[in-house]
Every structure is written in C-alpha cells, then in structure tokens.
Image (tube, helix red, strand yellow):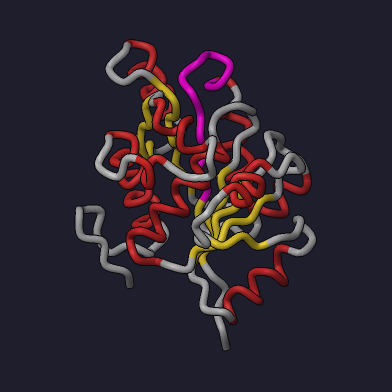
Amino acid sequence: MTSRPKVLVLASQKGGVGKTSLSAHLAVAAEQAGLAPVVIYDTDPQQSLGRWFLDREAETPKLARGGVPELATTLDRLGEAGVRLVVVDTPPALTDAIRAVLEFADFVLIPTQDGKADLAAVGSTVRLVRGLGRRFAFALNCVKKGTTQATEAALVLSKYGALAGVIAHRMAFKVAWNDGRTALEIEPKGKAAEEARALWAYVGAEMGLVTSRGKEKAYA
C-alpha cells in the first residue's frame, strides 16, 4: 500500500506574517537538501503561492492544484507518484477549512512577526493546533535580530511552544520573490539562505525526514 507524503502546514490567524514566502523557501530548501520532488499546495483564495510558482523558470518544487475538498485525494495521488513532502499554505483565518487542512498535517509551522498584534494572535492558532493534537513550532519572521523586541517576542513564544527558527528582515527575500525565486537561489551563500536552510533542518528533523539537524542532511 502506497503511503501518503508527509504534510507540512503553515498556519496563522494573523495575516502578513510571511506564511507564503516561508512555504516557498521551505519547499526549495527541502528540494536542495535532497528530498525532491517536493510539492506545494495553496489553499489561500488569493493564490499568492500559486502565482509565485507561475513566475518561476525552475520546474521544481511542483505545484498541485486544488482546494481543501480535494486535498485528501491529491495526497493519495501524490503518494502514488512517490512524493514525500507536501507544503501547504493557508489563508490568514481560523475557519472550518483551515481545521480540515490541519487534520492532514504531520507538522504545523506557525509564523509570526514580533509586533504586539502578531504575538496576540498566536494563542488562538495554538489552541486550534493543540486541539487537533498536531505537533507544531514557531518561526519568528521578518525581524531585526538582536533587538529587544525580537528577544522579548522569542520569550513570549517560548510560553506556548518551541521556536523553530528566526528569519531576519532581508532584501534578498523580497528581491527573489519578485521573479519567482527564493533567497536560496539568488544568494545561495547569503544570510537569508542560511536562515531558510536552518529552518528547514529543524522542521525536517521534527517531521522525521531529516536524520540530523547539522550540515549533513541524510534522509530516512
């Protein structure tokens, strides 16, 4: 019997926290680390991740089309095709549709920025994810590292769960996005790429797809 691929869901009640960008970067990081083919799946009605894919020249990661109702059958089909990881982007809301997506999650990454409103929205997302019994961690995104605000945000998040990684506010992320790429592709040796790879190393290990969080990423 063919098994379904592992499913990574990025979810947050708060909009503008970088779910879509992180979805793309994690998919590309996983591909580059040897988990190809990775598939992205966009359940946000705005289809920002899907549009990013259409702007790409690279053929990977692959895009699977469909909505929330088609997710189960799509995962079965992708499993039959040998896909081992699907990265799912979600809209900024906690609806029944999001709950349905989270039912399929092997791991949930909750991105947040370090603003007061961002942190205030974390609790409701965590309650939903915990209520479904799903494992999760946070990604502190688009922050200025070393600042008091970023440090305090990390402390707030530690009361809820683990911090998978910290992504700084860097132009490489924005420049890459404008033409359907990622920081991993335009500046592979840059700080932004390093942060994206570190985030994937954590998430991949938590999902059982990476045997080590070190530089060598051997897949089980």
- Residue 192, quarter of the rendered image: top left
**Residue 62 versus residue 105: which sits nearer the camera?**
62
**Residue 13 versus residue 186: which sits nearer the camera?**
186
| Residue 89: x %, y % from top left | 61, 47
Q: Is residue 67 above or below residue 45?
A: below
Query: Which quadrant, please, contains the N terminus?
Result: bottom right
| Residue 87: x %, y % from top left | 55, 55
Is 84 left or right of 46, judged from the image as shown? Answer: left
| Residue 41: x %, y % from top left | 63, 56
Q: Is residue 118 magenta?
A: yes
* Residue sitting at x 44%, y 29%: 141
Query: Which quadrant, please, contains the C terminus?
Result: bottom left
| Residue 105: x %, y % from top left | 58, 57
**Residue 31 versus residue 110: which sits nearer the camera?**
31
Whether residue 130 is visible: no
Per the rendered image, the range of residues in magenta is 108-119
Q: Is residue 106 magenta?
A: no
* Residue sitting at x 75%, y 56%: 68
Whether residue 119 is visible: yes
- Residue 30, quarter of the rendered image: bottom left
Q: Is residue 115 above or below residue 27?
A: above
Residue at the extreme left? 215
